[in-house]
Image (spheres, rainbow, N blue to C red):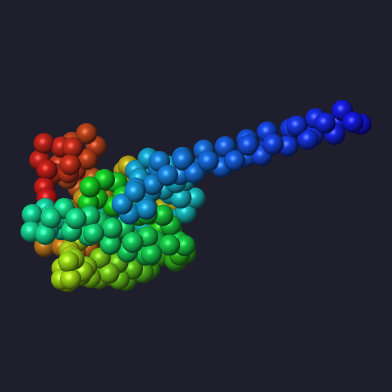
Amino acid sequence: MSELLTFAAASGPLAGAWGAHTLWMRHQLRAARQDPLTGLLRRDGFDPRASRLLRQRTTAVVVIDLDGLKTLNDTFGHAAGDEAIRATGKCLALWAHARGIAGRLGGDEFAAVIHRPPAGELAGRWKGLERQLWILHAKLCEPVTIEGREVPLGASVGAVVAPRGSGDLSTWKRRADEAMYEAKQCGGGWRIADGSQAAHRTVNGRRAGRRGTSQEVA
């Protein structure tokens, strides 16, 4: 019995240390998948979770791109651009909260996947999504205060309704990205894509004009 008590007394600190190390490792992994500027998931954290949601539920896949970020940086400095990105991340996190996930894919590019409430017809889902996108875009365009001045923001938003279990995430993000590009070409706002079939030529799986292609746009 005394040997068992001695073993238990000796192993207690080891178990505590291992538990603390496990918690630390989890914290490090979580931090590695979070964007430090916005607190949103980075691409490598966002994509797996978004894919799971896509398999389980009918969803709306949404892509957001800030308008005029380069001009904002040139006029007010990169700190102003960071503040615009931070404000966008906060807005998107609040919008997607409790019904999906949001992430910063890089630069001024964001994405969200939210589950759609059951509806008898696709048109019903579209109507609800239109209302939600209108709210999101209005919030994204609210001015931010930089050095005591209110600075207007702009954003272009694209979305697509993805039925449960219908294809991989990259396909739906590409369609939402195309819808976003159409909105940007029209001066901002939001658009909803029709189905998963690509409407524009792609380069390495991305719409021509996106970062990472030979025809980038602002």
Asked whether 45 or 34 is in front, the reply is: 34
Residue 115 rendering spot, x and y as whole percentages: 43, 58
Q: Is residue 43 above or below residue 152?
A: above
Q: Is residue 203 above or below residue 97?
A: above
Which residue does the image show at 28% across and 62% down from the upper left?
A: 87
Residue 6 rendering spot, x and y as whole percentages: 82, 31
The extreme top residue here reads 3
Q: Is residue 211 left or right of residue 74?
A: right
Residue 128 rendering spot, x and y as whole percentages: 36, 69
Residue 139 in sight from this viewpoint: yes
Q: Is residue 89 above or below residue 34?
A: below
Which residue does the image show at 66% across and 39% down from the upper left?
A: 16
Asked whether 121 or 5 is in front, the reply is: 5
Q: Quadrant of residue 120?
A: bottom left
Please tell me how many numbered marks the rendered image carries: 0
Q: Is residue 207 left or right of residue 21?
A: left
Which residue does the image show at 80% across and 30% down from the upper left?
A: 7
Which residue does the image show at 38% across and 47% down from the upper left?
A: 34
The extreme right residue here reads 1
Asked whether 161 or 67 is in front, the reply is: 67
Residue 185 in sight from this viewpoint: no
Residue 33 rendering spot, x and y as whole percentages: 40, 43
